[in-house]
Image (cartoon, rainbow, N blue to C red):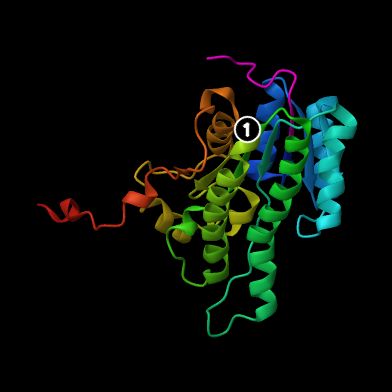
Amino acid sequence: MNARRFDGRTAVVTGAASGIGAAIAAALIAEGADVVGLDIDAAGLGKKAAELGDAFVPVVADVTAEDQIEAGIATAASRFGRLDAAFNVAGGSRIGAITDLAVEDWDFTVDLVQKSVFLCTKHEARLMRDSGNGGAIVNISSLDGRIPMPGGSAYATGKAGVVMFSKNAALELAPHRIRVNSVLPGLVDTPLVAAIMGYDPAKQMFLDRIPLGAAAAPEQVAGPCLFLASDDASYITGTELVVDGGWEVSNFPNLAKLAG
């Protein structure tokens, strides 16, 4: 395998200050890319910039604000002259039962996980299209885009929308040689799930459903994302890749546990 698949290429990564986004940024740079990292967390971006060096350009931006997204993505062209790949990772949620969930919490979650992907893809694709070089966009959905989560109706709905939006984008952008795919992670050990990972009873409830018996490290999601953006996946567009340790296929009770 070519360990320098992204030599001479430039990528945008949202949610780059921590978790999956930070892992993607580090992996890209290790394979030769320059990376523009967008996040609302200025302190986290500063730490990543200190770790990753000149190949990482931090941009503080709210990914639900179109003007900030457009300006942040334009940094790729102004700083490096091109945009070859984009990874739309930023996400989060406010949970609550449907009968109790405030409309503000619904809007916050759907805007963050779904509208941000639309806005980022819009401006990333414009830059790729106008350059004439094509490109690849990877949108981070979630296993919750396929499997409902009690208290997580806004998040699951938004993430399901990311999958369908990515298919639609793949269809529209193919004439410009821009590929679009989505990745659906399961449980990943990031700051967003620290409450679960830090409370053993809750953590074990999740691990009991995952055939591989562990949460993913962010790097284990970054690898499949880089694959989809690389030339190794040059004939893949409009699809989704589940990265969940087998969680999706584990829902039927394991009756073998009842055997003598």
Q: At 66% across and 41% down in the image, what residue appears?
A: 87
Residue 253 vertical position relative to residue 75 in the rendered view, above or below: below
| Kind of residue at badge 1 | Arg
- Which residue is at a point 57% across and 84% down the rendered structure image? 100
Q: Residue furthest front?
A: 175
Q: Position of residue 31 (x, y in %)?
A: 67, 21
**144 in relation to 226, above or below:** below
Total labels drawn? 1
Of the pair 198 and 145, the residue shown nearer to us: 145
Q: Is residue 185 left or right of residue 206?
A: right
Please give the range of residues in magenta.
Answer: 1-11
Farthest residue, direction right? 78
Q: Is residue 91 above or below residue 127?
A: below
Q: Which residue is mark 1?
A: 177
Question: Residue 200 appears at what percent x and percent y?
Answer: 48, 56
Where disc 1 sits, the SS reads loop
* Residue 131, image x, y percentages: 78, 31
Q: Main secondary structure of the magenta part?
A: loop
User: What residue sits 85% from the left and 27% below the top?
Assistant: 80
Residue 228 seen from this side: yes
Q: Is residue 137 magenta?
A: no
Q: Could you tell whether 234 is left or right of 94 in the image?
A: left
Q: Residue at x 31, y 57 (%)?
A: 251
Give percent across and percent down for residue 112. Answer: 69, 61
Which image quarter: residue 173? Answer: top right
Closer to us: 184 or 65: 65
